[in-house]
Image: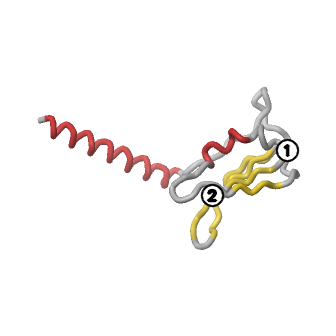
Amino acid sequence: MKLNHRALFFVIVLIIILLMVLGSKIFGTGYTSAITDKNGKTIPGSIASLEKVNLGGMEQSILFRGYNKDNPILLWLHGGPAFSQMPIAHHYDETYHSILGIYM
């Protein structure tokens, strides 16, 4: 009977993973929140945008974040096969506040 519980657990986990993947494809893969001040208001002139583009025949996402969209640009090509640092890019906002960060 113990083997059946393990098999059932494995099937349930597999179904949950499949539903998560399908949900991300159906409802979109992400967004980026606005850059805000201490009071939660959007900083005028800032930019926070997640765009999809076609590069080399593949759909790619590009994240634009900066306190001032007129500042110099830092193009950050990160990750590699199966790893992206885009979900943690907002942690670098304070470090790179004087530039416009573009994360690919």
Q: Position of residue 70 (x, y in %)?
A: 88, 52
Helix, strand or loop at mark 1: loop
Which residue carries the number 2 mark?
A: 61
Q: Is residue 12 left or right of residue 90?
A: left
Which residue is more in the foreground, 58 or 82? 82
Would you call the spot at circle 2 few (<14 residues within 10 Å), some (14-19), or many (20 or more)? some
Q: Earlier in the sequence, mark 2 or mark 1?
A: 2
Q: Is residue 24 left or right of residue 84?
A: left
Q: Is residue 57 left or right of residue 103?
A: left
- Seen at 78% across and 27% down, the residue is 38
Residue 98 marker? 1
Would you call the spot at circle 1 few (<14 residues within 10 Å), some (14-19), or many (20 or more)? some
Which residue is more in the foreground, 78 or 103? 78
Up the image or down, 61 lies above or below 23; here it is below
- Seen at 67% across and 52% down, the residue is 50
Helix, strand or loop at mark 2: strand
The amino acid marked with disc number 1 is Ser
Q: Position of residue 81 (x, y in %)?
A: 52, 59
Please tell me how many numbered marks the rendered image carries: 2
Labels 2 and 1 touching (C-beta < 8 A)? no
Q: Position of residue 103 (x, y in %)?
A: 69, 53
Q: Is residue 70 left or right of residue 24?
A: right
- Seen at 72% across and 41% down, the residue is 92
Which residue is more in the foreground, 77 or 39? 77
| Residue at mark 2 to residue at mark 1: CA–CA distance | 23 Å
Up the image or down, 36 lies above or below 24; here it is above
Which residue is more in the foreground, 41 or 71? 71
The amino acid marked with disc number 2 is Ser
Q: Residue furthest bottom?
A: 57
Q: Position of residue 26 (x, y in %)?
A: 48, 53
Considering the image in quadrants, where does the N terminus appear? Answer: top left
